[in-house]
Amino acid sequence: MYTNLLVIERFAQALRSGLINKFGYVPAASKLAIEFNLRNIDTNPISREAARKWINGQSMPEAGRLKILIKWLNLNPTYIYSTNDLVDERHFNQTANPIDATRLAIHTLRKAEHLAQAAINFASSLTVILDHFGCILMVNNAWRAAAMLPSLA
């Protein structure tokens, strides 16, 4: 059950992030339903209520519809289905074994990195985080999408 809830929560975060990158804001459920149905030729149209549940993280579309959303909004399926946060931290005992303490530290850092990535994906398009030397540390999905476009030169 925990796995399903986490996947639905991550889907909703990715969906809202993709909508912000596409429209500049999270549109109303009716607009999402209309825009989705314009691109959806293989399955039945979705209702405004289904779109509302997707946005609010109350449900998740089946595979065919999810595929359309991933392609249309450039969603990251790896983030949606990632199991990094599914590790139960109670399995790590810091005092018993230094290897377990290292695993806990790595797990904690990965959770922080995933949270940071989700946060910058909600930011406006072409967001980048630099270190004090000007080296790129992290970019959002809009930045990655722009990098994939063929150059006009």
Image (tube, rainbow, N blue to C red):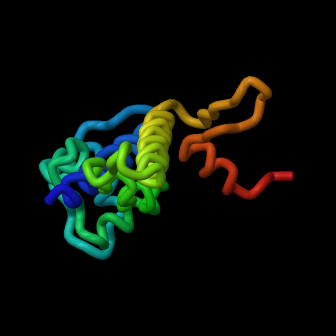
Rendered residue at 60%/51% (across/down): 145
User: Seen from this angle, which residue lies furthest top?
Assistant: 132
Whether residue 37 is visible? yes
Q: Is residue 151 above or below residue 130?
A: below
Relative image position of residue 32 (x, y in whole percent): 29, 47
Rendered residue at 29%/71% (across/down): 63
Give the quadrant of residue 46. Answer: bottom left
In terms of depth relative to the viewer, which is nearer, 31 or 63? Answer: 63
User: Seen from this angle, which residue lies furthest bottom?
Assistant: 42
Relative image position of residue 138 (x, y in whole percent): 61, 40
Rendered residue at 30%/66% (across/down): 65
- Total marks shown come to 0
Rendered residue at 47%/54% (across/down): 99
58 to the left or right of 152: left
Q: Is residue 130 above or below residue 86?
A: above
Relative image position of residue 12 (x, y in whole percent): 29, 47
In terms of depth relative to the viewer, which is nearer, 109 or 150? Answer: 109
Relative image position of residue 17 (x, y in whole percent): 41, 41
Whether residue 114 is visible? no
Q: Is residue 59 above or below residue 21?
A: below
Q: Quadrant of the N terminus?
A: bottom left
52 to the left or right of 145: left
User: Seen from this angle, which residue lies furthest right?
Assistant: 153
109 to the left or right of 86: right
In terms of depth relative to the viewer, which is nearer, 57 or 125? Answer: 57
